[in-house]
Structures are given as structure tokens and as C-alpha cells.
Amino acid sequence: MSRARRIVADPAGPDPDQLAPAAAALRAGALVAFPTETVYGLGANALDPDAVARIFHAKGRPADNPVIVHAPDAATAWRVTTGPTPLAERLAARFWPGPLTLVLDAAPEMPRAATAGLDSVAVRVPAHPVALALLRAAGVPVAAPSANRSGRPSPTTADHVLAELGDAIAIVVDGGPCAVGLESTVVDARGERPVILRDGAVTREAIAAVAEPLAGGTGAAPADLAASPGTRHRHYAPACRVLVAPPDGAVALARELATSAAPGSIGIVSRFPAPAGVREIGRFRDAADLAPRLFALLRSAEAAGVATLVVEGVPEDGIGRAVMDRLRRAGAG
Ligand code: TXA
Ligand code: MG
């Protein structure tokens, strides 16, 4: 049984009184999971090194992987940095509140635990009304990685959080399922041009409309990965094997695997109906339809007890880049 308290909040317009205990818990150094438009975050006061250390302990997160600091508005976000670059200001004006994280030079008072000892800090103003109300009520910047154990799929419901971290946190604020379902786009905004370190719902195309991104970032050579520490680590993996099939190849692959596998052990997520002998874990129309449900489907496959999940890949443009990034990592190793 989990011991975390669940506070149910209206996703459209949360009652500030209801959120007061969660805000007080954050100020007191406790761990509070909360919804954002992307995924649920595991929050702690970013200025309190002990509170931040609790995040790493609860997640089993490698100490070299820094966390994102959340704020209710840009002016508050800039306070944990040495100040925005002109590029950061333009990106924030265009995409905040929203699923974009900006990497900037860290303010000297930022705890090393939050930045993993880097000179930089990642900041984000989330678009979820519950997250914004909680951040305003807390009155402190909130460090929050995704609220999953390290290496697991990110949580998109409060139940996902409780299943994995219920014993380790004080409160989960339940604001319903996350609309975006994939983590924010992470952009290094310290230079004149953006460097995309992690693809997300703010697409490369949308960023290019503000400023053309430099090459590199996601998918970059290992030598460049120090710029984006999180990409080194294993990620998003459910308890089953995940195979990413080319578009139009998923059904044939699943059918072939099922001929030599134990009954019920092969699952599929595809645009098409499951072939005979294969368990249909989910169907989608296109990348935009799959994105918000992807992590929940990985958990469904695990709950269904399949040994191998075949997921049909999507074209790598727009939100499809982020979907394929997460799928490849879920399948790697
Ligand atoms: O949508 C999201 O971003 C969610 C919600 C809760 O806001 N948070 C999230 O946090 O996905 P997390 O910790 O799972 O991913 C943070 C990513 C990691 O890849 C980490 O390495 C990178 O951001 N990051 C954090 N600080 C950084 C820094 N100073 N420089 C480069 N990358 C950084
Ligand atoms: Mg994460």
C-alpha cells in the first residue's frame, strides 16, 4: 500500500485552498508529485539541497543527471539563472507557459544537486493550470524530473505515480491525465542559436520559426552527450521487450513472432488491427494521436504480461520526432 496522500484538483481551475497543503509540503522540503501538461513531475524545493537530494533518492536517479526547475512565470524562472539571453527571451515569449525547457547559465545560489554540478540550469514554465497554481502557492522554484523510477516510462496519470513512488512521496496532486504525454523539448538557449537537446511537443519546426536550431542535440554522437546528461541513461523501458517496426511492417513482424512464441506473449500497438494470435495493446491514427498515450500503452503492455511489444513507428517530423526518440530509447538495451 502506498502512503502518499492524493489531492484531487480540478484540471481546469484548481481551488487554491485545496492546493495549500501541497504548497506547504514543498516549502517544508517534502516531495510532492504534480501534473504538468507533459507528464507528472516529482517536485521539491529547488533551493533546498536536502529536498533535491530526496528526489534523486526516491527515483534512484544517477547524480550526474540534472533536474528541470519549474516556475509560474518567466520572471521567476530567470531568477535561478544569471538572466535570459535574447534567444531565451524570444523562445519564452513564444512558447511559455508550455512544453519547452530552456538551459541557461545557473545562478550561483542554485544547489549543485539540482544542476548535477554543471554551470547551467534547465528552467520551464508549464502550461497546466494545476501546476501553475501550485507553483504560485509554493512561492519557491520547484525542481521536478518526471515522477517515475529512473529508467521507467514517464507517468501520465496520478495512478502511474502512486504505483511506483507512492511509498516515497508525501502528496500526489491528481489533475487527471496529461494532455501532451511526452516530456518537454529541452533547448540550450545560451548561444545565439537554439540547440535541441531533447525533442518534445514544441517541435523542431516550431522552434525554427523563431530561430534556426544548430545541428546536434538529440541523436548526437556520444562525444556531445555531456551537453545533455539525461540522454546517456537508460530510459522509458517497461518490463517487456519493445520492438519498433517500420510503418507498415508492424503487423507482419508481430504475426511472424507469434508463430514461434508462447500464446499471448506478443502484443502490438499499430494503426491496424492485431493479426490472429497477437494481443492488441492499442491502436492509433497518427503520431499526434499516439503521443499522449504512448507511455500509458507501454504500461498497459506490461500489465497485460506480454513478453514482446511491437510498436509501429511513425514518420519523423513534427511530434513524430519525439515519439520515435522515446520509442527507440524504450527499445534500446
Ligand atoms: O516535461 C518535462 O520536462 C517533465 C515535466 C515534469 O516538466 N520533466 C522531465 O524531467 O522530463 P526529467 O528529469 O525526466 O528530464 C530532464 C531532462 C534530462 O534529460 C536532463 O538531462 C536535462 O533535462 N537537463 C536538465 N538540466 C540540464 C542542464 N543543465 N543541461 C542540459 N540538460 C539538462
Ligand atoms: Mg524523466
Image (cartoon, helix red, strand yellow):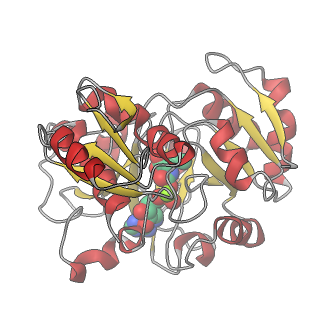
- Depth order, front residue of 211/322: 322
Q: Is residue 86 visible?
A: no
Name the residue at 44% across, 55% down: 307
From the image, which quarter does the C terminus lie in?
A: bottom left
**From the viewer's perspective, is residue 132 above or below residue 196?**
above
Residue 246 x %, y %: 13, 46
From the viewer's perspective, tell me whether residue 272 is left or right of residue 122. left
Residue 196 x %, y %: 25, 56
**From the viewer's perspective, is residue 327 above or below residue 108?**
above
Residue 276 x %, y %: 29, 32
From the viewer's perspective, tell me whether residue 175 is left or right of residue 244. right
Name the residue at 42% across, 68% down: 230
Q: Is residue 186 visible?
A: yes
Name the residue at 77% across, 51% down: 166
Residue 162 x %, y %: 72, 46
- Depth order, front residue of 233/56: 233
From the viewer's perspective, tell me whether residue 62 is left or right of residue 46. left
**From the viewer's perspective, is residue 80 above or below residue 137?**
below
**From the viewer's perspective, is residue 11 above or below residue 27?**
above
In the figure, residue 233 lies in which quadrant? bottom left
In the figure, residue 11 lies in which quadrant? top right
